[in-house]
Amino acid sequence: MNTNGMAGARLMRWRYLKQTIFFTLVRASALLIVLALGGILFHIFYHGLSAINWEFITRPPTHSMTKGGILPAILGTIYLTVGAVAVGLPLGIASAIYLTEYAKQGRVIRLIKVGINCLAGVPSVVFGLFGLGFFVIFLGFGSSILSGSLTLGFLILPTIIGAAEEALKSVPQTFREASLSLGVSKWQTIYRIVLPNALPGILTGSILGIGRAAGETAPIMFTAAAYFTAKLPGSVFDEVMALPYHIYVLATAGTNIEATRPIQFGTVLVLVAVVLGIDLVAIVIRGYMRRNKRW
Amino acid sequence: MAANDIIQIHHVNFYYGAVRALTDISMQFEKNKVTALIGPSGCGKSTLLRLLNRMNDLIDQTRVEGEILFEGRNIYAPQVDPVEIRRKIGMVFQKPNPFPKTIYNNITYGPKLNGVPAADLPGLVEQSLRQAVLWDEVKDILDKSAMNLSGGQQQRLCIARALAMKPDVLLMDEPTSALDPISTAKIEELVEELKRHYTIIIVTHNMQQAARISDQTAFFYLGNLIEYNKTEKIFTKPDVKQTEDYITGRFG
């Protein structure tokens, strides 16, 4: 009895110890992620903040990009991101509507869904080459905002389709039934009831895609981004500078890589700010749509 | 087959995949009468109700055999547009399901999309809400969200919304099962009132409710129509033993 009790106590102690070890590990993992994020942000701010001033965000680069600002790259990234969303959002929502509302579930649908997942796994440089071959050369759009937006639009398509599918599925079936029972057609039901109620959710998911579109380098390298151009784009057929590509150029192929370190970090800081800014716009629009939308 | 029958069902079988949910149903619904469909859960009464406005079309892999005539026309004929049928045969669901819109826009949603002129809408809203005995409670908050109403009010709003389409038939699928007794009483009074202008077919689990408000009662069991007769007869002297067992609470 006594030995049993002692063995039991030892077992309890061992189990308790195991639990403590496990909890410490998961806690450390979570902490590590926060630390990594904090570290990256601190690093960017520490090295980049000194480069930021009014001239930096309102002037084009000068002196072989070792001085001056990055305005063309800021505008280029904003154009490309907005363009990518303009391409990806309607196409993605339309695909999701087909998949969730119209298509009969079966082999074909499963195949399409596998295809979409594969698309999500394609490396971004492959999208860049596809864009080069198809939009730039075959369709003759040249290296331009249009080619870059289309390429980025396709890149973020799987994210948007996934988000839109989830959002459409979360609209209660009773809304569809109520609408149809009033002699309203299926398309009108989707357009008037399902879609408005799904839009906030669609936007939430799309924010991820927006961040990706703004930050990708490989897809725009061959399709839209200029090494250097001081002039601002006049049409969608113009080449633009873009923040991610500008960072890449300065850090690897610039005229004086060491001297431009502050500019590199400053540009990174601006890129992060632009992505957050675009996200913020999406969040505000979502908040506006969500009012009065509860069930 | 009286001339007064607005809906006639001839030898209808209905299948969910390989499972037969309704077996050889033949019955008629009389105009401007209230018909109650009763029976234990899974007996097919809701399935039958949803066949009448082709709501079962929404479910994949279902199959209908036989004919359902609405004003003499088979609503399952290939050239028939279900949207057309649903304009004439309205429905109220088990759980109140107003749209997350204002009270006003809930009522105008159907009529607007079906081409009712904008000038007629305010009058239609008042008329429909009065018919559903909700007008006095909501006339000052028409621009407020329908989601703020109580469950009973929401269900009367859904009835008003269906009435705004001026249907010939109103299908009600256990419309009071999610409501408290006071709201239930109000809806029952409403049904009494509405049958002067509409044909009402109501599925209910509440035997007293069927006895109180219906003119005809149909008893279903395991996908079969067991007995269909005047409500008074069903509840006092049913012909079939199963019916008697069910209404006296011996099974079900």
Image: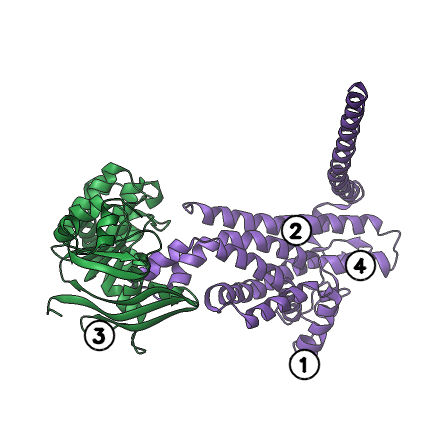
Q: Nearer the viewer, mark 2 or mark 1?
A: 1
Return the disc, 2 or 1, that comes first in the chain's sequence: 1
Classed neighbour count for the residue bearing mark 1: other residues with Cα under 10 Å, few (<14), some (14–19), many (≥20): few
Disc 2, SS: helix
A39 horizontally vs A141: left or right:
right
The residue indicated by pointer 3 is B73
Classed neighbour count for the residue bearing mark 4: other residues with Cα under 10 Å, few (<14), some (14–19), many (≥20): some
Measure how far apart labels 3 and 2 are at the Cα level. Answer: 62 Å
Q: Colour of chain A?
A: purple
Q: Are marks 2 and 4 on the same chain?
A: yes
Q: Quadrant of the N terminus of chain B?
A: bottom left
Locate residue A215, reporting x and y percent: 70, 56
The residue indicated by pointer 2 is A274
Measure how far apart labels 1 and 3 are at the Cα level. Answer: 56 Å
Classed neighbour count for the residue bearing mark 2: other residues with Cα under 10 Å, few (<14), some (14–19), many (≥20): many
Q: Nearer the viewer, residue A262 or A80?
A: A80
The residue indicated by pointer 4 is A248
Q: Amino acid at mark 4?
A: Tyr
Return the disc, 1 or 4, that comes first in the chain's sequence: 1
Question: Which chain's colour is green?
Answer: B
Locate residue B118, reporting x and y percent: 24, 59
Disc 1, SS: helix
Q: Nearer the viewer, mark 3 or mark 2?
A: 3
Q: Nearer the viewer, mark 4 or mark 3?
A: 3
CB within 8 Å, label 2 to label 1: no
